[in-house]
Image (tube, grey):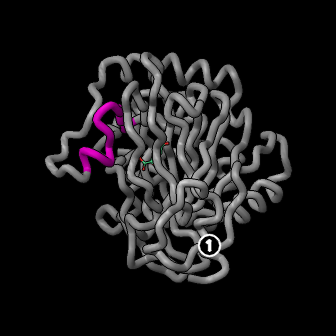
């Protein structure tokens, strides 16, 4: 164990206003492994997204379809998870083009160097227990670099996040831990309480998980959406969750982020091609 492993993190993550200097946002994120931007989503856009997405949430059943007990537990027996959001919400596509959200991806992963990992609604319902704590970057274990991010994520609150209804659990400072097996002590955990419209921005290295919901009738609704380096496979298969005719009508940035454009590495590699041409050609046909 090193000093970084034993040094306790702050009890609560920093909250900054949407109008804060982006450098102050990255500084807070770098220090603690995560931070909260209040009022990230404007009220009209929040209203639009809630209205567009609510019917899908009502229709969806909680729980996992995976046979393994590990995944059933990880996905949550009382949690609804919904993807394919570009088809379901024009508001979500607008948020994907938000300049601050783009600045986060560009800052941590490099401009034009990343794709959308997954965009999923995570709706934690009554009686849900705590999710297994985890680090997002462990999806790609052999790509992990000690000092660089390979994935960076935002959890947008579409309803208020409270201690009772499932606010995300984070372990501030754990992005610096060098011992991957180090156990988390209860006093190192903090709950991400925030108002609807706020966003938790966090490192792929920080330990976190969905919180328990002890309410009788409240659903905690999050839109969990991260970016991943363009040469790594994304968690969500966006080209199957978004039909081609829908992709044709999306903003260019969204088309790129969900893989309807090919990836060109700075050093010359090209990935995700169609007939050795850019996948964007398919959108023109
Ligand atoms: O729902 C949350 O607050 C976090 C969920 C999460 O980290 C996950 O499902 O990977």
Residue with the mark numbered 1: 176
Q: Secondary structure at mark 1?
A: helix
In the rendered view, does 164 fall on the left or right side of 121? right
Classify 196 as above or below 134.
above
Q: Residue at x 54, y 66 (%)?
A: 205
Tell me the residue at 66%/80% (across/down). 3
Viewer-closest of 52 and 153: 153
- Tell whether 279 sits left or right of 185: left
Q: Residue at x 49, y 37 (%)?
A: 250
Which quarter shows the N terminus? bottom right
- Look at the image and tell me whether residue 51 can be seen: yes
Q: Pinpoint residue 66: horizontal percent, then vertical percent.
A: 19, 46
Q: 225 or 243: which is nearer to us?
A: 225
Which residue is located at x 38 percent, y 58 percent? 234
Asked if disc 1 is less than 8 Å from ligand 1, the answer is no
Which class describes the residues within 10 Å of circle 1: few (<14), some (14-19), or many (20+)? Answer: many
Magenta segment includes 73 = yes
Question: Which residues lie in the magenta part?
Answer: 71-84
Q: How many marks?
A: 1
Residue 114 visible: no
213 to the left or right of 31:
left
Residue at the far left in the pictured view = 67
In this orientation, which residue lies closer to the viewer: 65 or 248?
65
| 258, above or below 173, in the image | above
How far across and how far down the image is residue 75, in percent? Answer: 32, 43
Place of residue 149 in the rendered image (x, y in percent of width and height, measured from the top left): 57, 69
Q: Closer to the camera, 100 or 279?
A: 100
Residue 215, compared with residue 83, is above or below; it is above
Q: Position of residue 210 (x, y in %)?
A: 46, 43
Q: From the image, which quarter does the C terminus lie in? A: top left
């Amino acid at each position: 164990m090193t000093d970084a492993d034993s040094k306790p993190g702050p009890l609560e993550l920093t909250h900054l206003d949407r109008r804060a200097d982006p450098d102050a946002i990255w500084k807070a994120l770098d220090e603690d492994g995560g931070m909260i931007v209040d009022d990230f989503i404007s009220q009209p856009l929040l209203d639009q997204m809630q209205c567009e997405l609510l019917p899908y949430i009502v229709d969806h059943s909680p729980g996992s379809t995976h046979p393994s007990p590990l995944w059933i537990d990880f996905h949550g027996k009382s949690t609804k998870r919904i993807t394919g959001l570009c088809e379901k919400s024009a508001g979500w596509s607008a948020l994907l083009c938000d300049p601050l959200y783009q600045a986060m991806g560009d800052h941590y992963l490099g401009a034009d160097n990343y794709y959308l990992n997954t965009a999923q609604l995570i709706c934690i319902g009554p009686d849900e227990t705590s999710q297994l704590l985890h680090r997002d970057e462990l999806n790609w274990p052999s790509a992990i670099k000690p000092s660089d991010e390979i994935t960076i994520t935002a959890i947008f609150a579409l309803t208020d996040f409270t201690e009772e209804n499932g606010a995300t659990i984070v372990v501030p400072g754990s992005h610096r831990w060098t011992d991957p097996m180090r156990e988390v002590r209860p006093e190192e955990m903090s709950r991400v309480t925030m108002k609807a419209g706020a966003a938790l921005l966090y490192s792929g290295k920080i330990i976190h998980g969905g919180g328990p919901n002890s309410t009788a009738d409240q659903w905690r609704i999050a839109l969990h959406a991260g970016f991943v380096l363009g040469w790594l496979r994304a968690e969500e298969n966006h080209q199957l969750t978004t039909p081609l005719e829908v992709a044709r009508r999306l903003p260019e940035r969204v088309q790129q982020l969900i893989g309807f454009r090919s990836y060109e590495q700075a050093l010359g590699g090209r990935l995700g091609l169609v007939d050795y041409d850019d996948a964007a050609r398919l959108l023109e046909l």
